[in-house]
Image (spheres, grey):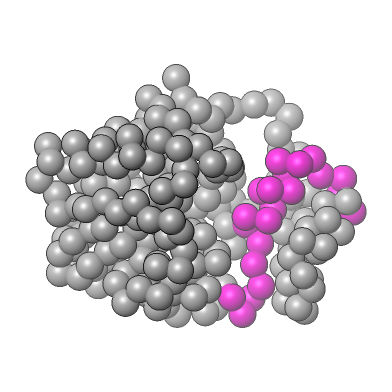
């Protein structure tokens, strides 16, 4: 049914991964490079490739965590304002939750999936349900307009744009979809409320909304959540 499945043997006991996240955060706090820090921690804890991906997506320096928290807007602050979405970032997380895949609870409070984009996107059974659930939450928040940004170089972005527009026309939501070469700098410099869990954007944008977490908690309470 879905693109992401539960698989046995993915995770060691949670204390092992949590210790690895602690170690990685300690190194990041002291200015060590993320890549070399991840290798050091992964080797020390004898982690598999996917486990290293998990701890990399969950750990962050304390200063980054605090800065992100200061710039995060609450749901009550959204009404009447523009919201710009990092399209693939939020969509794949909700898709993963619906498909029974791992959803990571990161140290900064974000929810992140384990999917990796390698230049292509494939529509799955969860795509439309995920968009509908995202839409229901946004509709309750009442933004004046939502602009979805999709990476034009990713194959099937045009097809996903058409699906998003079909969903929004049916529901009457104020959504628009833009295909751009790289959404990251656009979102990082936006004065609108940004929806993403991408740490590169989170550390540069003005204000952001933790929408994926809100959608998973409200619309997919049965999601397989691993909090590290």
The residue nearer to you, when weighing 147 against 11, is: 147
Residue 96 in picture, x, y percent from top left? 47, 37
Q: Residue at 35% across / 73% down in the picture?
A: 190
The residue nearer to you, when weighing 35 against 43, is: 35
* Residue 144 horizontal side relative to residue 29, left or right: left
Region in magenta: 44-64
Residue 61 is one of the magenta-drawn residues: yes
- The answer to whether residue 72 is visible is no
**Total numbered labels placed on residues in the image:** 0
Task: Work out which residue is located at the far right of the displayed protein and give it.
Answer: 44
Q: Quadrant of the C terminus?
A: bottom right
Q: Residue at 52% across / 50% down in the picture?
A: 112
Would you place residue 49 above or below residue 22 in this image?
above
Would you place residue 134 above or below residue 102 in this image?
below
Task: Work out which residue is located at the far top of the displayed protein and give it.
Answer: 1
Q: Quadrant of residue 191?
A: bottom left
Q: Quadrant of residue 209?
A: bottom left
The residue nearer to you, when weighing 77 against 192, is: 192
Residue 7 in picture, x, y percent from top left? 64, 26
Q: Residue at 82% across / 62% down in the picture?
A: 36
* Residue 133 horizontal side relative to residue 86, left or right: left
Residue 197 in picture, x, y percent from top left? 48, 59
Q: Residue at 30% across / 54% down in the picture?
A: 178
* Residue 27 horizontal side relative to residue 158, left or right: right
């Amino acid at each position: 049914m879905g693109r992401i499945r539960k698989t046995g043997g993915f995770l060691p006991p949670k204390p092992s991964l949590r210790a690895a996240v602690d170690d990685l955060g300690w190194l990041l706090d002291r200015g060590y490079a993320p890549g070399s820090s991840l290798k050091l921690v992964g080797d020390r804890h004898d982690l598999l490739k996917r486990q290293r991906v998990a701890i990399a997506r969950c750990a962050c320096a304390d200063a980054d965590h605090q800065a992100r928290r200061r710039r995060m807007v609450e749901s009550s602050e959204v009404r009447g304002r523009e919201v710009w979405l990092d399209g693939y970032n939020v969509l794949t997380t909700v898709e993963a939750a619906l498909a029974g895949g791992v959803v990571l609870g990161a140290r900064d409070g974000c929810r992140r999936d384990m999917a990796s984009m390698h230049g292509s996107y494939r529509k799955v059974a969860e795509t439309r349900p995920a968009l509908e659930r995202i839409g229901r939450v946004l509709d309750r928040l009442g933004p004046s307009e939502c602009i979805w940004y999709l990476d034009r170089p990713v194959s099937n972005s045009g097809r996903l744009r058409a699906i998003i527009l079909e969903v929004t026309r049916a529901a009457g939501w104020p959504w628009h979809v833009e295909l751009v070469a790289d959404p990251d700098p656009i979102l990082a410099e936006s004065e609108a409320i940004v929806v993403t869990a991408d740490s590169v954007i989170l550390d540069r944008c003005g204000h952001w909304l933790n929408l994926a977490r809100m959608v998973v908690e409200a619309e997919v309470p049965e999601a397989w959540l691993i909090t590290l």
